[in-house]
Image: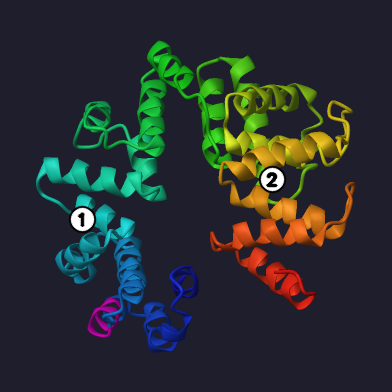
Amino acid sequence: MITELYKNNNVEKEISDYVKALEMAQTDVTSAIQKLLDTAPEQTNAKFAVLALAAELINMDPKNTKNTKFVPQVAELGCKLGVSQCFYIAGRFATCKTKQYEYICKAAAKGYISALHDLRTVKHLPFDVIAVVQNAMKQQMANQQLVLVLIHRYALDSQFEEALRMLDSITECSDSQLAMEISYLYSQCRCIDKHLLWYGISMTLQAHNNGNRFMLCSANNKAPYLAALFYFIRHANAGNHVAMYTLGSLYLHTDMFGTIKQDYNKAMDYLIKAANLNNVEAMYMLGNLCAEGNGIRQDLATATHWYTQAAKQNHELAKLKLKQCHIQGYK
């Protein structure tokens, strides 16, 4: 756990100071938390990781008063830095009902799994989840995670009509996990056509996030795939750069179902449109296509242009490819 926290916060060089705390946690969680707080560095990213771990250790045994005595200190420091785990323990141990839902909702809005799970599924929370999320939406403080929490609660209470109304208001999504969740909610509401549609969208997004354009076909079901294609074509025509990039990627291959035939001209057209709308992955893919000459004429000068554009947005692989172009004399 601690290694991942530090990797995620780009502070691996700090890890040696805290390995002992992790080892200590195997036998003495209380001493481990104390050590983490005593050695917390001033560097923001490192402190973020330390407080996140301390909060996780407290959550491991929330009934242990030796550990929960650290809650005020961990919560105060962590909430100032926006640490989702610290918002969660601040909510769990708050004595005021208003503070409970305020902090748990903040943790959920940051995508903290335990907070999202509580808001979605726990029936006997000390506050009205639907009212809380509705209020957050009125104040324009609710992201898509919290909107889906509200839909979950409607489905949990068998208020399917209200759940469907909110689901139908979601017109686009660029995250495969959220799309899969929307698919699940449609299935809960017995709306099978839209369940298949969003399943296809999720699988399409997942395939491209993993660089595997054929993952879709593993389901052996053409219906969700076609539904996803329809979705992306519609949104690409409406100017959505994620949909343009996805379609451009798909046209580089002939799919298993024969629905899309390999067409480099269409692929380039969609990718260029997406890149012109500042889609960094489209820029990088265009650079690769031009550099390698796959399906199109090799053009290192144009490849350098697209790598440069992607590198300006801190695309690490584009930076490496750009250096190779410079070595070959292309600026």
Mark 1 lies on a secondary structure that is helix
Residue at the (60%, 22%) spot, across then down: 195
Residues in magenta, as a range: 33-39
User: Could you tell me the amino acid type at mark 1?
Assistant: Ala
Residue that numbered label 1 is attached to? 90
Count all numbered tags in the image, as a single digit: 2
The colour scheme of the drawn protein is rainbow
Q: Position of residue 129 (x, y in %)?
A: 26, 31
Q: How far separated are the C-alphas under marks 1 and 2?
A: 37 Å
Q: Relative to residue 5, is residue 86 drawn left or right?
A: left
The answer to which of marks 1 and 2 sits earlier in the sequence is 1
Question: Observer-nearest residue: 260 or 126?
Answer: 260
Q: Is residue 209 left or right of residue 52?
A: right
Is 237 placed left or right of 124 in the picture? right
Q: Position of residue 290 (x, y in %)?
A: 80, 54
Query: Which residue is at a point 15% across and 64% down the rendered structure image?
Result: 72
The quadrant where residue 96 appears: top left
Residue 34 within the magenta-colored segment of the rendering: yes
Tell me the crowding category of disc 1: few under 14, some 14 to 19, or many 20 or more residues within 10 angstroms, Cα based: many
Label 2 CA crowd tier, 10 Å (few <14, some 14–19, many 20+) = some
Decide whether the magenta segment is chiefly helix, strand or loop. Answer: helix
Q: Relative to residue 51, is residue 240 depicted above or below?
A: above
Residue at image mark 2: 208
Whether 226 is drawn above or below 174: the answer is above
Tell me the mark number nearer the camera, choosing from 1 and 2.
2
Q: Residue 277 in the image: state x and y as whole percent.
A: 57, 41
Q: In which quadrant will I find the C terminus?
A: bottom right
The amino acid on which the numbered mark 2 sits, given as a three-letter code, is His
